[in-house]
Every structure is written in structure tokens, then in C-alpha cells.
């Protein structure tokens, strides 16, 4: 019996899985088309490497976001797309490294030496190896072979992979740290959600009040982290960075984006909880 990627665990056709499956090809296709039509700037191959690497990190984050999203939105069936997204992140990482090798003229000795000598490449390669291990053990057969407990323990390394990916992105971006800082803040939110859900959650789900508090806390941590970085790296007065976070004069700051995403999820959770209560059938005492 053929197993198609758009079927659910019961072998039935899933519109959700089909939509996600098709969507996962879109970023790579856009980069390929943009490269073909010379739309990637003066250094098209370098920009293609950057774009594919960026989508690798986004897919890792999306895979990490499935658990809180399905709990907040009370949509348990979202779990069926997590494996697909995680494997796609690995595929994008392979493409990312392959394009880098192409940029080096496929001189594998040079590629290897660069990975060893450049810290940010070493970190990125460690994240790739982690993704490879998770992708190789993502099948039902491997879950049965490893056992549920050992398999879950192994796949908890995705949290470390997320941290390594953000560090790699921060090092690679150098001065343009707007999006890497946002990702660091969102990663703090994603990891903190799991910790809080275990400590104070009800059936693994956080109350909306905790979601709101977490969102504010993640925004504050993002602002503080950005302030500390600019102080240590460039000697910038911390008050200037904090003032920029409270103003739109320099554009929307990373802390504001993290806060907006967190509060949007909080609002979505509140709306979902309200709609669930309204549609719950009345039962007489």
C-alpha cells in the first residue's frame, strides 16, 4: 500500500497535509525562479544561500510552534504536519549547504576547512547534523525501533537545534540583526511556553493570562538582549536602544514584533476559548 504525504495517520486524505506539503515547496521554487531571472541582486548565488538558510530556520521555528498552536487554538489535528515540516527543514538545510559548496566551486576540502575555522559555520553544521539525526529517525519504523520514550528524548534536541540556528544566523548577519533578534525573542517564547505549560498548565495548556504575561516577558527579554548586545559589541548607550524600542522613529523594533506575535496568539486563544464555550451544548443540572 502506497503511503502518500498528504494522507493522515489512518491513510485518509488530509486537505491540511496537502496544503502544507504544497506550501513547503514554495520558498525554494521562488528562490530558483528569482535566481533564473536574475532577481537576486549583484551576488545571486550568495543571496540564494541566504534565502534558503533563512527558510531553514523559519521551518524549524514553525515545527516548534505546532505544539503551542494546536493547544492555544484547540486544534489537535495540527500535529499531523509537524513531522513533514521538520523533514522539510532538513531538506532546506541540505540545499543551503549544497549552495554554499557550489559557491566554493565544490572544493570540499575548502568547505570542510571553512566549517572548522569559522565559528558560525561550525555552529550551523552542528545544527545540520542534529536535523539529519531527527530526519533519519522520523519514520514510524524508527519510532517503533527506538521506543516512544527514547524517541521523544532524542527529538527534544530540536530545542538545541533551534538555539544553534539562531546563533548561526546572528553571527552570519553581523550588523543586520533585526530579524535574528526577532527570532531569538520568538525562540524564548516557544521554549518558555513549554516550561510554563509543564509547571502551571492545565492538561499541558496555558491559560490566556499566562500567555499574555509570557508575551510581555518575551518582548522585555528581547529588548534587554538587544540592549546588551549593542552595549558589548559597539558601546552604544543602553538608554538609546531602549528609547528606540519605545519609538517608531527608527522603525518597528524587534521587541515590538515579538510582543505583537505573542499578543496575537493570546487574542486567538481567548477567541477560541470563548467560541468553544458558546458552542458547548447546555446540560441540565
Image (cartoon, rainbow, N blue to C red):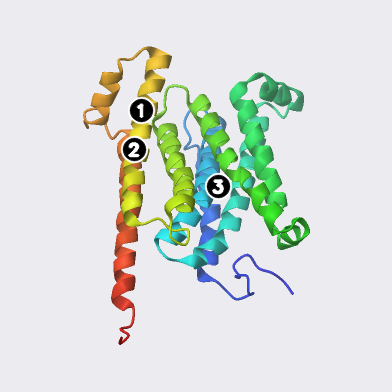
First in sequence: mark 3 vs mark 1: 3
* Residue 281 vertical position relative to residue 188 in the rendered view, above or below: below
Q: Could you tell me residue 100's position as x and y percent? A: 63, 31
**Which residue is denoted by mark 3 in the rendering?**
28
How far is disc 1 from disc 2 in space, using C-alphas?
9 Å
Crowding at dot 1, Cα within 10 Å, few <14 / some 14-19 / many 20+, comes out as some
> Taking the image as drawn, is residue 35 in sight?
no
Residue at the right extreme, as displayed: 145
Name the quarter where the C terminus is drawn.
Answer: bottom left
Nearest the camera: 166 or 73?
73
Q: Earlier in the sequence, mark 1 or mark 2?
A: 2
Residue at the spot of label 2: 219
Q: Count the marks: how many?
A: 3
Say few, some or many: other residues with alpha carbon within 10 Å of mark 2 (under 14 / 14 to 19 / 20 or more). Answer: many
Which element type, helix, strand or loop, lies under badge 1?
Answer: helix
Q: Position of residue 236 (x, y in %)?
A: 33, 15
Left or right of 38? Residue 274 is: left
Q: Image quarter for residue 260? A: top left
Which is nearer the N-term, disc 2 or disc 3?
3
Instruction: Kindly identify the residue that appears in the image at 30 percent across and 19 percent down.
Output: 238
Quarter occupied by the N terminus:
bottom right
Q: Give x and y (percent) for residue 158.
A: 59, 44
Residue 242: name its quadrant: top left
Residue located 45% across and 55% down the image: 68
Residue at image coords 54%, 62%:
79
The answer to whether 279 appears left or right of 56 in the picture is left
Amino acid at each position: 500500500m502506497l503511503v502518500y504525504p498528504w494522507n493522515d495517520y489512518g491513510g485518509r486524505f488530509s486537505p491540511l497535509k496537502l496544503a502544507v506539503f504544497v506550501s513547503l515547496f514554495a520558498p525554494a521554487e521562488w528562490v530558483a525562479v528569482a535566481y533564473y531571472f536574475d532577481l537576486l541582486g549583484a551576488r545571486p548565488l550568495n543571496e540564494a544561500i541566504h534565502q534558503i538558510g533563512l527558510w531553514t530556520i523559519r521551518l524549524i521555528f514553525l515545527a516548534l510552534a505546532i505544539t503551542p498552536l494546536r493547544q492555544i487554538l484547540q486544534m489537535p489535528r495540527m500535529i499531523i504536519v509537524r513531522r513533514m515540516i521538520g523533514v522539510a527543514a532538513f531538506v532546506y538545510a541540505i540545499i543551503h549547504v549544497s549552495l554554499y559548496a557550489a559557491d566554493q566551486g565544490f572544493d570540499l576540502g575548502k568547505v570542510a576547512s571553512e566549517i572548522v575555522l569559522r565559528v558560525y559555520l561550525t555552529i550551523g553544521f552542528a545544527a545540520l547534523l542534529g536535523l539529519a539525526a531527527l530526519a533519519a529517525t522520523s519514520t514510524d519504523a524508527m519510532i517503533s525501533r527506538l521506543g516512544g520514550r527514547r524517541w521523544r528524548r532524542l527529538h527534544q534536541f530540536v530545542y538545541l537545534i533551534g538555539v544553534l540556528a539562531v546563533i548561526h544566523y546572528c553571527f552570519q548577519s553581523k550588523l543586520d540583526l533585526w530579524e535574528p533578534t526577532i527570532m531569538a525573542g520568538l525562540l524564548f517564547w516557544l521554549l518558555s511556553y513549554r516550561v510554563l505549560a509543564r509547571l502551571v498548565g492545565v492538561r499541558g495548556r496555558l491559560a490566556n493570562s499566562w500567555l499574555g504575561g509570557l508575551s510581555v516577558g518575551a518582548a522585555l527579554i528581547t529588548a534587554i538582549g538587544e540592549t546588551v548586545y549593542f552595549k558589548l559589541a559597539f558601546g552604544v548607550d543602553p538608554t538609546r536602544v531602549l528609547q528606540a524600542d519605545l519609538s517608531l522613529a527608527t522603525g518597528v523594533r524587534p521587541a515590538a514584533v515579538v510582543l505583537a506575535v505573542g499578543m496575537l496568539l493570546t487574542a486567538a486563544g481567548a477567541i477560541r476559548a470563548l467560541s468553544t464555550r458558546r458552542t458547548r451544548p447546555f446540560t441540565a443540572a
